[in-house]
Amino acid sequence: MHRAAANPYNTNLPSRGVVKCSRCGLNAVTFIRYNGTHLCHQHFVEYVEKRVKREIRKQLSIDGPMKIAVGLSGGKDSSVALVLLKKILEDRRDVEIHAISVDEGIEGYRPPSLEKAAELTRELGVQHHIVYFRDEFGTSMDAIAPSSGFRTPCTFCGVLRRKCLNKKAIEIGADVIATGLNLDDTVQSIMMNFTRGDVERLARLGPHVKVQSGLIPRIQPLRSIPEKESYLYAMLEGIGFSDDECPYSDPALRNDYREIIDSLENRSPGSRFSILASYDAIAPLLREKYPPAKLKRCECGEPSLGTRCKACELLDELIGVDQTKS
Ligand code: SF4
Ligand SMILES: [Zn+2]
Ligand SMILES: [Zn+2]
């Protein structure tokens, strides 16, 4: 889900010269409420990078040549994930980083963000692959959205985009796909699945620890980085990103969880980390109880639970609906 943001991230910036960095005494650029520290530009950047480095080490064992495909939308989180992976792994000659963007065909929204993605990959010298819904499925989100019926456009978009990413990642020989999911996204997903009682889905939340044939595992380098910190990192480091809102976004449900979690965090700073830590503690038990199902292969070539993959099933629902709009 891509969010709108006319600066929705209260980054706690103090007025210049008033508050000093808790580590070096220079002017602070932010206050980290959950640990009570003020940080200057340099110490904030180091603070973020240190945790992302730890996440990468935890989620990825690099014991030979490796290719990482970053799912790059041109938004702040995936752009920050790409920049950080590139920076943290720059000395690893055996690691190749690529970026994959998906053009779902959303006029006025996707082209500018793809432009940002292209600029960033040019700056970083990263190979950029773009997959088009129009080429893959002969349709676009602008055509699908009006006919999505009882489903939300995001249901179609998410499933089809996952398929595009997985397929392209296989095509370029990637070992993992890195996404820009941050701490807030992760905790919202955990709470949503808990509340729905969807324990099986809870067991399957990334990062993926088991490799399944035909499915490229996912890593989440920003998993322990709050959204505000990802935003501030992008601003301070001059990373160009698009903050436009998708015209089909229906953030209602996720917004409820966002509000609940934000108010928990306000009342008791550090709550998001506690929820994540509790999830991580029970995740191995959940995975043991709900091991990944044996996957079949859909006629389109994608791995799937049933005889047809979710993308093909959803596309079947559109049969007979005019898909000519681009
Ligand atoms: S349709 Fe939904 S999932 Fe797709 S880009 Fe828009 S908000 Fe994101
Ligand atoms: Zn400092
Ligand atoms: Zn299929």
Image: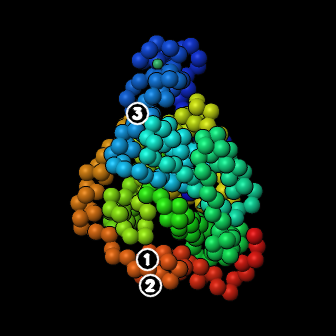
The amino acid marked with disc number 3 is Lys
- Quarter holding ligand 1: bottom right
The amino acid marked with disc number 1 is Ser
N-term mark: 3 or 1: 3
The amino acid marked with disc number 2 is Thr
* Residue denoted by label 2: 307
The percent position of residue 296, horizontal first and vertical second, equals: 40, 80
Tell me the element at label 1.
strand
Q: Quadrant of residue 288?
A: bottom left
Relative side of 205 to 134, left or right: left
* Residue denoted by label 3: 50
Distance CA(mark 1)–CA(mark 2): 7 Å
N-term mark: 2 or 3: 3
Residue drawn at point x = 72 percent, y = 78 percent: 323
Distance CA(mark 3)–CA(mark 1): 37 Å
Q: Is disc 1 in contact with disc 2, using a CB cutoff of under 8 Å?
A: yes
